[in-house]
Image (cartoon, rainbow, N blue to C red):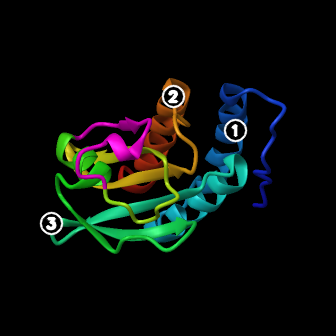
């Protein structure tokens, strides 16, 4: 299946996410290889929204280990409770950071990152990983991003972990 996730700057953010979800569901439907699905998810999100950095960290050996991503070089591993990703893992909740310089213990994988959103992937009350998205602009992420990206993670979870 070939889908075009080209950025549509004329539509408002909620509409862009609605269109993205319509195309995303068929893209991953019936797929079960975690790395492949996460890799295409990163590519689709980057193409559709032109995020500065988008990727996944997966829980392995009590750390978040770098998984598929789109963007500049990233940190290899993150401890539980450390930085935005580790905090989202420890607290099992989405974290939106308007200014990463104001987040205690922020891990600066790139000095160009200015704001961030991290959504945990939770299966049966266990965090399997996180979706991490960075922007090179302050205050980039809002409630629309949070709700829409949580829907995307729910679809991933249902596709990959509940077959």
Residue 102 falls left or right of residue 151:
left
Q: Dots 3 and 2: beta carbons under 8 Å?
A: no
Question: What whole-number distance in Å separates the C-alpha atoms at marks 3 and 1?
Answer: 35 Å
Picture layout, residue 16 above or below residue 6: above
* Residue at 49% in and 48% down: 114
Residue 148 percent across, percent down from the top left = 54, 33
Question: What whole-number distance in Å separates the C-alpha atoms at marks 3 and 2?
Answer: 30 Å
Within the image, what quadrant is residue 12 found in? Answer: top right
Which residue position holds label 3? 62
Q: Earlier in the sequence, mark 3 or mark 1?
A: 1
* Residue at 84% in and 32% down: 10
What SS does tag 3 mark?
A: loop
Q: Residues within 10 Å of mark 2 (few under 14, many from 20)?
A: few
Q: Is residue 85 magenta?
A: no
Residue 136 falls left or right of residue 18:
left
Residue 6 falls left or right of residue 129:
right
What span is in magenta? 92-106
Which residue position holds label 1? 22
Tell me the quarter of the image containing the N terminus. Answer: bottom right
Which residue position holds label 2? 142
State which mark lies toward you, 2 or 1: 2
What SS does tag 2 mark?
A: loop
Is residue 163 or residue 138 the one in the foreground? 138
Residue 45 percent across, percent down from the top left = 62, 52
Q: Residues within 10 Å of mark 1 (few under 14, many from 20)?
A: few
């Amino acid at each position: 299946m070939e889908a075009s996730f080209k950025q549509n700057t004329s539509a408002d953010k909620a509409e862009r996410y609605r269109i993205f979800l319509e195309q995303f569901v068929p893209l991953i439907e019936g797929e079960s290889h975690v790395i492949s699905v996460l890799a295409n998810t990163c590519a689709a999100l980057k193409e559709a929204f032109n995020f500065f950095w988008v990727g996944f960290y997966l829980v392995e050996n009590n750390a978040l280990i770098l998984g598929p991503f789109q963007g500049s070089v990233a940190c290899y591993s993150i401890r539980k409770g450390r930085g935005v990703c580790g905090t989202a893992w420890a607290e099992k909740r989405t974290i939106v950071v308007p200014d990463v310089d104001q987040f205690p213990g922020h891990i600066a994988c790139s000095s160009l990152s200015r704001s961030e959103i991290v959504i945990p992937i939770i299966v049966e009350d266990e965090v399997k990983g996180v979706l991490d998205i960075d922007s090179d602009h302050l205050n980039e992420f809002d409630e629309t991003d949070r709700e829409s990206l949580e829907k995307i993670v729910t679809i991933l979870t249902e596709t990959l972990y509940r077959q």
